[in-house]
Image (cartoon, rainbow, N blue to C red):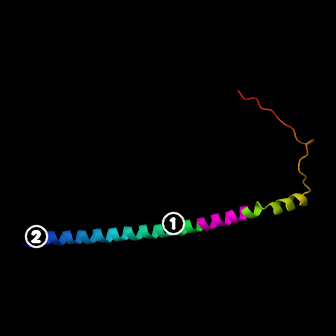
Amino acid sequence: MNKINIVLFVLTVLSALAVVTVQDRSRESFIALEKEHRRALDLEEEFRRLQWQQAQLANHARIKEAAARQQLQPPTVQNTHMIRTHHE
């Protein structure tokens, strides 16, 4: 009977250690998941900001204003050259 108690005690201790290890890994995984979730939210926010910025930069009035400021003129027929490519 004494040997059975020792074996059961050892198994209980090993089981307890296994539970602690699994809980620790679970906690670490949860922390990593939360960190990646926050990173995903940050990336989504940055993506929305970049989309807004792109829309602002693509605004036709803003483009015309920048072209006028730089004294850019649309190309004329005399400035346009057609290049033919040979397709096989």
Secondary structure mostly seen in the magenta stretch: helix
What span is in magenta? 43-54
For the C terminus, the quadrant is top right
Q: Nearer the viewer, residue 18 or 72?
A: 72
Q: Secondary structure at mark 2?
A: helix
**Residue for badge 2:** 4
Nearer-N-terminus badge (2/1): 2
Q: Residues within 10 Å of mark 2 (few under 14, many from 20)?
A: few
| Residue assigned mark 1 | 36
Residue mark closest to the camera, 2 vs 1: 1
Q: Nearer the viewer, residue 25 or 61?
A: 61
Asked if the magenta segment contains residue 75, the reply would be no
Q: Nearer the viewer, residue 13 or 67?
A: 67
For this rendering, which residue is in front, 2 or 58?
Answer: 58
Q: Residue at x 82, y 35 (%)?
A: 83
Q: Residue furthest left?
A: 1
Q: Tell me which corner region of the image, top left, top right, bottom left or bottom right, holds residue 55.
A: bottom right
Which secondary structure, mark 1? helix
Q: Amino acid under label 2?
A: Ile
